[in-house]
Image (cartoon, rainbow, N blue to C red):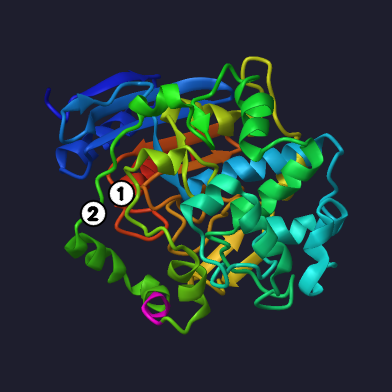
Amino acid sequence: MDVTEVHGTVAHGFEPVSDAFRHNFAQGAEVGAGLTVYRHGEQVVDLWGGLADLDTGRPWERDTIAPLASTTKTFAAGALLLLVERGQVDLDAPVAAYWPEFAQGGKGGITVRVLLSHRAGLTSMEARPVTWEDLRDWTPITDTLAAATPEWPPGTAHGYHGVTFGHLTGEIVRRVAGTSLGEFFAREIAAPLGGLDCYLRVPDGELSRIATMVVPEAEQVMLGMEVPELAGMVHALNDPTTLTYRSMFGSVAIGWDTTNDPSTYQVESPSMDGVASAPSLARYYAALIGEVDGVRLLSPRLMDQARRSHGDGIDEILRVRTSWGLGFALPGGPMWPAPEEIAGLFGHSGASGSFAFADPERGLAFAYVPNRGSELLEGGDFRVRGLIEALYEGRR
């Protein structure tokens, strides 16, 4: 099979997106990838191509699922916001109202809103770096977070909770819903939308559909790290004394080379190890901002809060400018791959290269899922930037 062959459909007016998608393959930037766009609840772009497994030659199919890395966090955010939508969780109530043990270490005043917006200061698991067994058992991680002391006065600054966000939000869901985050997402979000191929724990029968990730070579990563805007982050990641290092590399004991280990996806790791297909990821985002086959997940009023900036400026962890809503990244800074001048968007990127976002004003929902990892820590590389530029041709 020609790895640059692209399949799928594109509605009239979206042809530039198809051209950009094909261009990425033609430039040798992709191994395999899927791209889906919804507009006003209807699918208008559905493309896929290349190889799901470079070694075996397995082709990428429309329903191929692939690791999302940090884009996973938006499944956890959506689940918690659904409980807010239903009146079971109050954004401005203390987290300890739902998770009493969380009040330890002077955290009794941290609200759900502060937690969702990466302002709680609970970024490091250095006291007990995460292991596979901890992910399997869940509670060792949440017990550690409940006992932790914030790295800064909560609510006074924002910093990416890269390793901890999924368990912090997921434990509230577990306490309120009485079931695991993954089970809640599958039952209350994935199932009503027709059985989304979006997983916080991949069922055994679906493991064979996961694309094999191709990690960028060291030279490519070094080039990515030479982006001038990322200098602060790169310096901090290479200094074990920094909070950045302690919150990222120092918080994980299982290594960062387990991407293609099936056991990685057989536990709930809602900060970084979710899996999805592009059509299902786009459908999820479309249902956050409008009806999809009669199903809408969140009201416009709540989504307006979720996409309002709660923290903007230099990120305490990433050491670059970021902007955070409620569980979603917002336009601003080098980690955001869409044009910053297009306001009102919300989404998330991942080191796997994945990116998803929604644009309520234009009714757009976008999902890009590749299997060649990004040279950048949290994704947002040139491949996805070109796709988004093409999407907005004539639509700004």
Report the residue marked by disc 1.
373
Q: Are dots 2 and 1 in contact, CB under 8 Å?
A: yes
Q: Which residue is mark 2?
A: 216
Q: Position of residue 237 (x, y in %)?
A: 40, 75
* Residue 317 visible within the image: yes
The quarter of the picture where residue 256 lies is bottom left
| Residue reaching furthest to the left | 2
Q: Secondary structure beneath disc 2?
A: loop
Q: Which residues are magenta?
A: 235-239
Of marks 2 and 1, which one's residue comes earlier in the chain?
2
Q: Amino acid at mark 1?
A: Gly
Q: Mark 1: which secondary structure?
A: loop
Q: Residue at x 42, y 79 (%)?
A: 236
- Residue 5 vs residue 55, the one in the foreground: 55
* Above or below, comparing residue 92 to residue 44 in the picture: below
Q: Residues within 10 Å of mark 2 (few under 14, many from 20)?
A: some
Q: Is residue 292 left or right of residue 224?
A: right
Q: Position of residue 181 (x, y in %)?
A: 65, 39
Is residue 242 or residue 138 the one in the foreground? Answer: 138
Q: Nearer the viewer, residue 276 or 125?
A: 125
The quarter of the image holding the N terminus is top left
